[in-house]
Each structure stands twice: as C-alpha cells, then as structure tokens.
Image: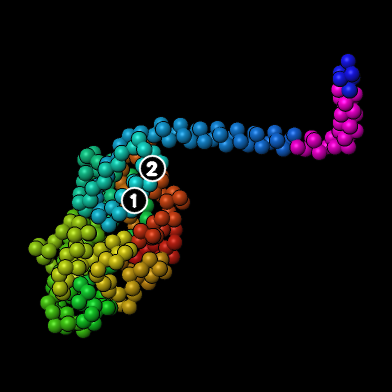
Amino acid sequence: MKTRKVMALAGAGVLAVSMMTGCGSSSSTASTTAAATTTAAAAETAKEAATTAAEKKADLTGSITAAGSSALKPLVDDAADMFIEKYPDVSITIDAGGSGEGLKQVSEGTVNIGNSDVEASAKLDETQAKELVDHQVCVVTMAPIVNNDVKEGGVENLTKQQLIDIFTGKTTNWKEVGGPDESIVLVTRPTSSGTRATFQKYALDGNEEASNTSMETDDSGVLLQNVKDTKGAIGYVALSYLTGDAGVATVAIDGAEPTLENTYAGKYPVWTFEHMYTKGEPDEVVSAFLDYIMSDEYGAKMESLGYGVSSKMTNTEH
C-alpha cells in the first residue's frame, strides 16, 4: 500500500509539473509538431517521387540502332553508355559508315537513327529527305591534321588557298609551303562522308579534292592513324578525335587554330551542326535517348568530348 501511494504522489507531481511547463511552451510544442509533420510530408513526397522515377526507369525498355557520321560517333557512344546506366533495359547499337550511309539506312528503315554531319537533302533525294525528322544535337569542328614530321619541318599554319592547292593536287611537296622537302600524302574520306563534305565546303571553298584511293577510309579513327603513321601525310578529322594525345599535329587556317573557342567566336570557319535523323517522329525509347543527348544534364559533357554547344555560337551562319 505504501508503495502505491508513493507512486501515486510521484505521478501527481509529474502531472503538475507538466501542466505548469505546458502552459508556458504551448506555441513551442505546436511549432515542433508542425515541423515534424512538414518533414514527414516532404519525406513522403520524396519517397513517392523516387518510386515514380524507379518505375519509369524500369518501364523504359527496347532497342535503338544508329549508323552514320564517324565524326559524331564518339559523342553518341558516350551518351549511349550513360543512358544505359539510367535505363538498363534499353540496348543501343551504333555503327559508323559515313553520313551518307546513315541517312540511307534510316531512310530505308534499317536503323532508328541516321547520324549526319550534313542535312539530309545533301545526300538523299527530295522525297526521301522530307520523310526524315531532323534532331540537331551539337556543333562539330573539323581540323586539318598532319604527321608530326610536317609540323617539325615548319608547317603550323596554311592559308586557305594553300590548303586548296594541297588537297586538289596542285601543290605536291611540303617545301612549296615552307615545310620539309617531302612529298605530300593525302589521306581522304569517300564521297559518302559528311566530314569530307563539310571540309570541302568550308575549308576548300567547294573545290573537289584529289583522289587517293589507296589512302581513303570511311572511318575517322582509321584516317587519324594513317596520318600518324605516314610521313608527309595530311588529312582532316573532327575535334572529338583530338581531345587526348592523338599523335598528330593540327594546322591553323589563315592564322585561326581549330578550337572550340575560335569556332564559338566565329574565327574558325570549318564547322557544322550535327544531326540525328529519324524517319518520322521517334518512338518512346528513341525519343527519350534524343532528349537525353540534348538535355542540360548531358550538355555539360559535350565540350569535354570536343563538341560544341549550339547555344554558344555567336554566329550560326558561315
């Protein structure tokens, strides 16, 4: 009985203290309760958003095939790897072959995406071109490249006319442009190449380059290796192939180095917009992939790969 009485008295004391304390802190208690409720609601909302995102991620399944521009391929390869990390149930296959081949395949329906350095109308007839939807994804800069012995021999800059004379076969020895006494070896791309079309239009002022079938390749990576391995060689590739130690030297045109900064500023002339064409509007999976490439999230990665962000161009005509 004594024990119960002491406990009862202790309980009464606690109750009294609680009542006294409660009278002085009612607003504090209410604020704490409201904050706890808000935090719980926010956590629930975040949980629901995460669940929705996870469900969306799980729901996106399918396959994507693309072919075409070798200049654009490094970017599409990289974007595909990152996209598959987000959506592991999507498979993506990417081939090169040149812009003309990519446009031909997407027009025929054998691939979902045709990657191209040029507009479809440059490689397809009017009816075929009208069936395609253009998704303009970035800017690519094309650079003349030479074997290191040519640079060491004194060639670091060429006028546009000197470049034209070299690629049309009029100039055949490097000593004619201040370089070593060494024959010029042209390493070229086939007529189906969008890189060739871009270089011909903006670096050679439309002049047709001389043929060198023994050193012609439909792949920019192979062209780069051929220039690297061949004394006296000259060719051209996108900056995306020159982001590391490529083992070749770039050549300025009329004093302007082939860089993104000079392209943005309108100082360097050999660049073009890159296109990813679909035949009609893309399906859900292809659309999601294209949206990802053109998103702000991926845009931050483009420049590190040697590609230009279209919105940074000060002059979009040339």
Residue assigned mark 2: 85
Given residues 10 and 283, the one toward you in this image is 10
Labels 1 and 2: the sequence-earlier one? 1
Most frequent secondary structure within the magenta stretch: helix
Q: Is residue 142 visible?
A: no
Region of the chain picked out in magenta, as a range: 7-32
Question: In the displayed structure, would residue 103 be above or below residue 196?
Answer: above
Residue assigned mark 1: 78
Q: Is residue 20 visible?
A: yes
**The C terminus: image quadrant:** bottom left
Disc 1 to disc 2, C-alpha distance? 11 Å
Residue 7 on image: x %, y %? 86, 22
Image quarter of residue 160: bottom left
Given residues 260 and 10, the one toward you in this image is 10
What residue lies at 22% left-to-right and 72% top-to-bottom?
Answer: 146
Is residue 280 toward the left or the right of residue 190 in the image? Answer: right
The mark lying in front, picked from 1 and 2, is: 2
Question: In the displayed structure, would residue 11 be above or below residue 53?
Answer: above
Q: Amino acid at mark 1?
A: Asp
Q: Amino acid at mark 2?
A: Glu
